Amino acid sequence: MSNSSSIRHFLLLALADTPQLQLLHFCLLLGISLAALLGNGLIISAVACGHHLHTPMFFFLLNLALADLGSICTTVPKAMHNSLWDTRDISYKGCAAQIFFFLFFMGAELSLLTIMCYNCYVSICKPLHYGTLLGSRACAHMAAAAWASAFLNALMHTASTFSLPLCQGNVLGQFFCEVPQVLKLSCSHSNIRELGLIAVSFFLAFGCFVFIVFSYVQIFRAVLRIPSEQGRHKAFSTCLPHLAVVSLFISTAAFAYMKPPSLSSPSLDLALSVLYSVVPPALNPLIYSLRNQELKAAGWTLMTGWFQEH
């Protein structure tokens, strides 16, 4: 029996048992991370350099790209390192830092997705009030609130989790440090406090999802009244991918954190974690950039200008 004061490192879940599969996982993770870095980096550069893209929608998209970059850089590089060097170690402080930054960027992503839904709702349902409701100051305040609330939520969960005594070993059933996996190592009944915090966060996330669904009901009602078929198609093609990403992100994360221990298994936990921690940061650039002509044009101009200079 060991306690948290004697734990110097944790052992993460090995993604494969053989060197060949480990190399395959490394290549897959490398491809996903490069796609996420390239896509989100291109969005950030295009929005920052394109003055005609300095609008509320692209401002929030830039913030979402930053959150995506942060989340995938928090978990994937360590998993790639472990797969390549056939190790499972992560230090105690490294684990705490990974949990904090993962919760920070995931919380910011959920808040920003909710704000982007509100932006879509105002632009379609209340276009005459768009400039008033989503002025530059209001957008800055909403983005700041998203990042600040994510920081406080991550700090609260990380402090609560690592204040618990750990006496069930140091083996985590996940390829990165995660609150539910660390709680499994706790021998204290005070982990009810952290479970309560998870429940509060879940209900807040569920509230965001309800707000998003309600907003989209209003959006679809407004879109169906558009006489032009081309206008309806454009509105649906813009909003439906956003709804799909939000649904995937919230449903898989909520199930991973709230499911009973009897349903827990390494393969299920791994699949769920990939769906809400790796897939959205890689898919968001494709969903939001490929369906937006302005962003595609700005990105193409940026890339061609870079190649001409070099």
Image (cartoon, grey):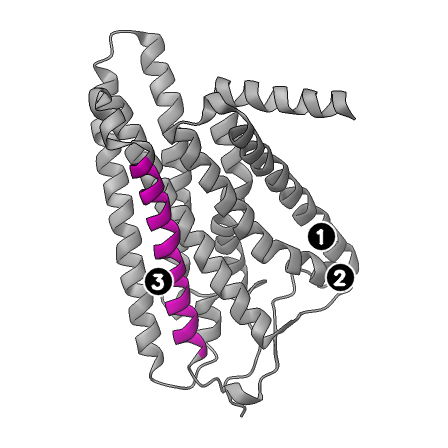
| Residue named by callout 3 | 258
Secondary structure under badge 2? loop
Say which label, 2 or 3, has the lower sequence index.
Answer: 2
Write down the region rendered in magenta.
137-162
Res. 149 mark: none
- Amino acid at dot 1: Phe
From the top left corner, tell me how far across and down residue 184 is, in percent.
45, 76
Identify the residue at horizontal 52%, vertical 71% (top origin): 96
The C terminus: image quadrant: top right
Quadrant hosting residue 243: top left
- Amino acid at dot 2: Thr
Q: Are marks 2 and 3 in contact (CB under 8 Å)?
A: no
Q: Residue furthest front?
A: 137
Up/down of 240 relative to 158, above or below: above
Up/down of 96 relative to 58, above or below: below
Identify the residue at horizontal 48%, vertical 74% (top origin): 182
Q: Residues within 10 Å of mark 2 (few under 14, many from 20)?
A: few
Residue 155 is one of the magenta-drawn residues? yes
| Residue named by callout 2 | 18
Secondary structure under badge 3? helix
Quadrant hosting residue 195: bottom left
Res. 26 mark: 1
From the top left corner, tell me how far across and down residue 275 is, in percent.
49, 48
Residue 80 is one of the magenta-drawn residues? no
